[in-house]
Amino acid sequence: MIDPACRLSLTDLARRLDEGALSATQVTEAFLQSIDAQNDRLHAFISVDAENARRRADELDAMHARGARAGALHGVPVAVKDIIDVEGMATTGNSRITITEKAAEDAHVVARLRAAGAVIIGKTMLHEFATGGPSHDLPWPPARNPWNPAHHPAGSSSGSGAAVAASMSPAALGTDTAGSTRHPGTACGIVGMKPTYGAISRHGVFPLAFSLDHVGPMTRTVADNAALFDACIGHDPRDPTSLRDARPASPDLGKSVKGLRIGVLEEFNAHAEDEVRQSVEQALDTLREMGAELVAMDLPPLQTFTDCGRLIIQAESYAVHKSWMRSRAHEYGWRARTKILSGAFVDAGTYIQAQQLRRSLTQAFDQAMRGLDAAVGVSSLHLPARVDDDDAIDATYDRQARTPFNLTGSPAIAVPTGFAACGLPLGMQVVGHHRDEAMICRIGHQFEMARPWAHLFPPVADERADG
């Protein structure tokens, strides 16, 4: 039985902690028990830092007793993708290569969360070094989808998505190089944001592809996501891409979408399977009924964006792993090894051409966004396959409409839109102008108010079916 405290949203938890209706110790224990009850089945966590989480909760309760408050996340547990450094914990990347590498200090984003009062509860599952896909030849087995554990929860921030959906943590950090916060957001029926490039520091985050990597929040609701994002932003001189002028996402959540001009990413939507596309079309109808003006967009083909992103990821990830690939390639799982090694065949000229094409695609998207407040379209093109079906994973996993916004650096947030006939979640993404996380969260939150999902939970572990 899941403790009722674990069913509360981050913002509700923060309020009740502030009021004294719940203590940090109570909340931390509730989530530790939820993890203990479900992790053997869902594999959402690689490691749980129960001792330090309890110690931190005690400190925060003592502070509250003195009438003080650490910050907006005082006493709220947060899980961290195991490619982001947490002092004293191994950053394994779910790889034999780095399985014992303990972090000497917190990543900047983790330090920001601690300063806001968060309790770091553990490190979540991921695909090896945030690439590849679900794989059964790694140190830890792949995470499972809480709505149907026979299926994958998407990724590469797979454990973060599963943990939030299954009430094992009210919030989590993920990374997003080609959609890896939004993919599990959609697959797990939660909210995943890829912020503006540079909005959240990547210092202390193991890179996949430097020019495309983002850190992003994953939560049950849009308001939660905005709150977590607001705690994470802040200039960091140790990350040369870190923005000095990142803006909070929360201020405009209560504003209507009436009168907003929202572009429709039809070029991307057309490639989705029927249930996915129809769900997004119904979401667009809801936004229209709420008073938004929907505008068709003229964009380059989705495949052009996808091919460009693939070349850049191949080249940049191979640059990171080149020395290990020469001496320890056999220690990688087969999916990560195959994807990373493909970068050995991307020469400098091809990489430069891909970056030049990226600039042209970004200009085309910026042109299409002129006069618009945001854009809306599909996130995933397919429902998540069974976790043990390699052929289906190979056929569907990389077919998605998220990579374009890693290329452009635009903020994008995935929000739920409903469920497929098989019971797996569906979703869409809202895309904004640079540094306008407030607008995409405003649209996402207002859509959530019209089509709420936060009261829906996957069945608890002992009630799940494997089919």
Image (cartoon, grey):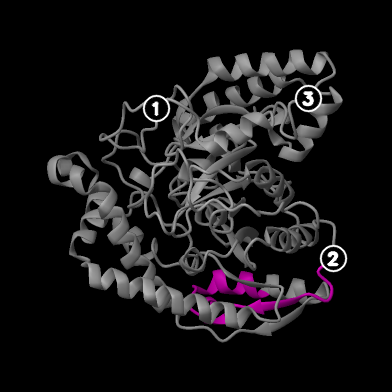
Q: Is residue 237 above or below residue 405?
A: above
Q: Mark 1 points at which residue?
A: 90
Quarter of the rendering containing residue 390: bottom left
Q: Which x, y percent locates residue 141?
A: 35, 37
In the foreground, 308 or 247: 247
Q: In this view, does 52 lie above or below 403?
A: above
**Amino acid at pointer 2:** Ser
Q: Determine the residue positioned at 65% across, 75% down.
A: 281
Instruction: Name the mark nearer the viewer: 2 or 3.
Output: 3
Q: How crowded is mark 2: few (under 14 residues within 10 Å), some or many (20 or more)?
A: some
Q: Determine the residue positioned at 62% across, 65% down.
A: 434
In the foreground, 452 or 19: 19
Q: Name the residue under label 3.
A: 69
Q: Is residue 105 left or right of residue 12?
A: left
Residue 140 painted magenta: no
Instruction: Magenta stretch: give its range.
Output: 256-281
Q: Is mark 1 on a helix, strand or loop?
A: loop
- Of the numbered discs 2 and 3, the one sitting upstream in the chain is 3
Q: Mark 2 points at which residue?
A: 256
**Amino acid at pointer 3:** Arg
